[in-house]
Image (cartoon, rainbow, N blue to C red):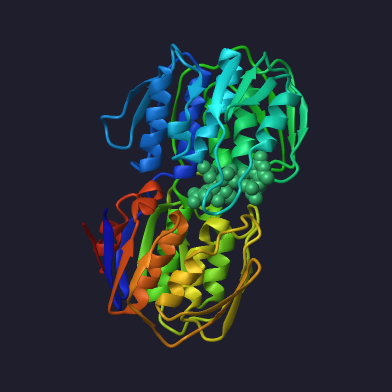
Amino acid sequence: MDKLLVEGGQRLHGEVVVSGAKNAALPILCASLLSAEPLVLSNVPRLNDVNTMERLLAQMGVAIDARTPGVVKLDSGRIDWPLAPYELVKTMRASILALGPLLARCGEARVSLPGGCAIGLRPVDQHVKGLEAMGATIDLEHGYINATGRLRGATIVFDMPTVTGTENLLMAATLAEGTTTLENAAREPEIVDLARCLTAMGARIAGAGSNRITVEGVAALHGATHAVMPDRIETGTFLAAVAATGGDVAVRGAQADSLEAVMDKLREAGATIDIRGEQGKHAGGDTLRIRRDGPIKAVSLRTAPHPGFPTDMQAQFMALATLAQGTSVITETIFENRMMHVQELKRLGADIEVEGSTAIVKGVDKLTGADVMATDLRASACLVIAGLIAEGRTTIDRIYHLDRGYERIEQKLSALGARISRIA
Ligand code: EPU
């Protein structure tokens, strides 16, 4: 099994280009199920989760051509099996995103119930409740969600903002009869990107990015081309890495307005960030230049749904906080078990106490390299950053988690001067 070897102590310098967003690409790949005409996507990151989603769609009968790097052509002219089997769903929870589109297009769908996962229980009751409100009949049997029925518009009030829940119902609503209103919808930029793609396919959507989304159903969607937005969490991970190591890096191809909360906290921690490019417009045209020379200052934060501080950046910030002057208080509010990196950071010499879902991080003078183990995707990114700032060698085991969501991260960091390599 692959590991990463990191020799810490290098400041990062140079330029790095951000890849397309995993959490936008996954729902958008599923959106291809909504139309019998081809969908051509660009800026698709080559990640294990994207490979898994392509396998899932292919076994349903979708024809996929991914020979050109970054481009995926999907043709869902025929759907043979509106089925997402346990074998694939258990490796990737985002498979649940097939449920809404399959049901809307085929009038039936059978999708394995995702189990719990390392970071928390993560139920899908909101997805199911919403589809039932739209007229679906849903049975949970033998570990599967069996859904049938023709969908009609409805008003759905989510109990909490859920990202994939909002995406599933948004996709389903595009082909439902009549108007659907999603209240207390999640506002993440990936939902806006999905809505842009669906609109290019002929969907009638208003309000994506706000907490009320309205969809007028149409009889059919057509083919389209769409460029996936830049990955804001990959961007934030590079920014946090530079804030931690010190140095001067230009992160190119980013979308600055998707990262306000993260940039605010990095500035509080002592980094300087200049934004060049088309801020405010979707384009992936922004360059974020980050520098840090002075000390790292302690920063406290609470994760929250967008536009709050993203849970997917909490672990990376904790790595930064380990070397800050003073005490940082970091509270996770989205997932109940997303502090597994704490034990590993302590192996490197960090001083962290966890009380409930809050970590109290007292800055120390240095971390020292050790063998650590990744437990989930963002915890892996946290350990990479910790390895970069630790004295000596750190080996990170179980980096298959990292390969689910970061494209060539060790190559990108090496190009910035990090000493990081993959070992067997
Ligand atoms: N929730 C429910 N019932 C539901 C749905 C959600 O109780 O039916 C709860 C969850 O348990 C959680 C909260 O609502 O406490 C929010 O979860 P959400 O549904 O928003 O999470 P998700 O859609 O499963 C997506 C990302 C995650 C990211 C979260 C939060 C994708 C494919 N995944 O998950 O990304 O952490 O939103 O922003 O978009 C990652 O990339 O590392 C990752 C875990």
On the image, the x and y values in percent for residue 277 come to 45, 54
Camera-side residue of 377 and 189: 377
On the image, the x and y values in percent for residue 322 come to 48, 78
* Residue 209 in view, yes or no: no
Camera-side residue of 111 and 208: 111
Camera-side residue of 422 and 304: 422
On the image, the x and y values in percent for residue 150 come to 67, 13
Give above or below for 287 relative to 153: below
On the image, the x and y values in percent for residue 179 come to 74, 22
Q: How many marks?
A: 0
Q: Residue sitting at 60 percent across and 23 percent down?
A: 203
Q: Residue 208 is drawn in which quadrant?
A: top right
* Residue 342 in view, yes or no: yes
**In the displayed structure image, the side of residue 225 where residue 368 appears, left or right:** left
Q: Residue sitting at 35 percent across and 49 percent down?
A: 403
**In the displayed structure image, the side of residue 414 where residue 365 appears, left or right:** right
Q: Residue 347 is drawn in which quadrant?
A: bottom left
Most extreme residue toward the left is 424
Q: Residue sitting at 64 percent across and 58 percent down?
A: 308
Give above or below for 144 relative to 254: above
Q: Residue 212 is drawn in which quadrant?
A: top right
